[in-house]
Amino acid sequence: MIFDFSPKARILIVIMKNLKTTPRQLTFQLDTKSNNGNTDPRISYNKIPVMKSTFKAGLDQPVHRWFRLTPSFGPDLVREMLVSMNYKKGDTVLDPFAGASTTLIECALNGIDCFGFEINPFLHFVGSTCLNWSVDPSQLENLLCKVKNHFQTSLKFFSITDLGSGKLPIPKIHNPFRWWRKDVLYELVVLRETIKSIDCDKDEKNLLLLGLAAALVPDLTNVTLGRLQLHFIDRDNDNIEVWPTFERQIKEIIEDITTISHGPFGTASLYHTDATNPSIKVPNKANLVITSPPYPNRYSYVWNTRPHLYFLEIFDTPKQAGTLDMKTIGGTWGSATSSLAKGKVEADFPVIDKVVMPVARKIREQENGNLMANYMTKYFNLIGHQITAMEPFVSNDVRIAYVVGCSRLKGVYVETDVMLANLIEGLGLGYKVSSIERIRKRNSGKNLYETIVYASK
């Protein structure tokens, strides 16, 4: 298979070296029975190692390592999907659930034009900043020295008793000293205020703030990333060093910008908008969609970015986090939980009634199952709205790849991949699912797979 990429694009070399066989040759059949016992011929198994399919693949790769978002898929998986979808030069890629912008970064690095949507304002900041490689690395290095000098001077000028005053405003998050040790928060706030006051252009300042945000969790905060959500831990006796941790992050950014500075790059745009109702216009339609919506497992991207949202002063009232979670697909934190516990969420599409509601009824039959039944119904309703709302942004011959995960709610198996495949075909938009490709068996329970659902018009 030959692709016509620009001479300096990495994707052909990387894909063909890393994948000694094609994705179809890697496929091995295990058990194609879906949860209802019927054989689904669309299901196949293409085992991809965790170090390639998850966020771990990006921890040592340029730009991808600038910010760690644990539930993200890795850049290797983006390359895998581009091969499977027969990417051609000139195709444009859309990611409607950009997250840490893994898809956009990988496409842009390889000369592929792309755009994405992101509802979370902090993750939009992360993605937009990670996609800006125009900053002079030597200038950023000079700025780092300047920030260090100002920071050390400010530590002598202020004292920890200034925390919470007009001089050193603390994050307006509930119980901030549960999130940060007081001495650590003092240094963090001084560093944040130093960066805000430093004389530099916006792009440079954003990279400095991104480095601070990346250092924040888990290194400088009283949390562990855990298996699913952030969990509080006791760090009273830990040696927590603010400046060295921040400095390492910025030096990685400087190193990567220096390494990739020659290009050519694809054009990448990230829009701060709701994928279920995007209120924006784009210059070109997408031929390919590569994305991973939240899984129906109660993981909250809002909860897991709360320290960033409040520390960077993007949010300044506790209510904002709960309000955002209510809008997101899969969110159940704060007021979203109490809202979903009431009444009964109905199907928004006939196909939801057919595909989702039988499972929702099983969940509702369990003890205190109404919340989770409503949660799952809302999840698929919003996925349906997202796919429908995507129509003005994609071509008539679009090919799509959705990475999703199966889950269990109240002990009831939610076969997300098969349900999503049936939803995609049942919306009446002209999609035909070609493959339900299970790539990884998750550790959190029986038959819990991560899957790529491929479809096209």
Image (cartoon, helix red, strand yellow):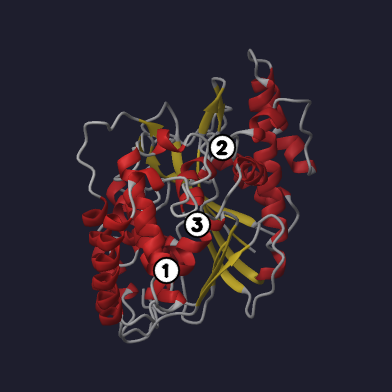
Q: Looking at the image, is mark 1 or mark 3 nearer the viewer?
A: 1
The residue carrying mark 1 is 197
Q: Which mark is residue 296?
A: 2
Q: CA distance from mark 2 to mark 1?
A: 42 Å
Which amino acid, by three-letter code, is at mark 3? Leu
- Going 47% across and 42% down the picture, which residue do you hit? 304
- Going 66% across and 58% down the picture, which residue do you hit? 431
Indicate the position of residue 394 as horizontal and vertical percent values.
65, 69
Indicate the position of residue 265 as horizontal and vertical percent values.
40, 81
Please rate how many residues cluster around mark 2, counting C-alpha atoms within 10 Å: few if below 14, some from 14 to 19, many from 20.
Answer: many
- Going 67% across and 25% down the picture, which residue do you hit? 371
The residue carrying mark 3 is 123
Quadrant where the N terminus sits is bottom left
Dividing the picture into quadrants, the one containing residue 37 is top right
Which amino acid, by three-letter code, is at mark 1? Ser
Looking at marks 2 and 3 on the same chain, the residue that comes earlier in the sequence is marked by 3
Indicate the position of residue 456 as horizontal and vertical percent values.
60, 62
Q: CA distance from mark 1 to mark 3?
A: 23 Å
Q: Is residue 154 above or below residue 137?
A: above
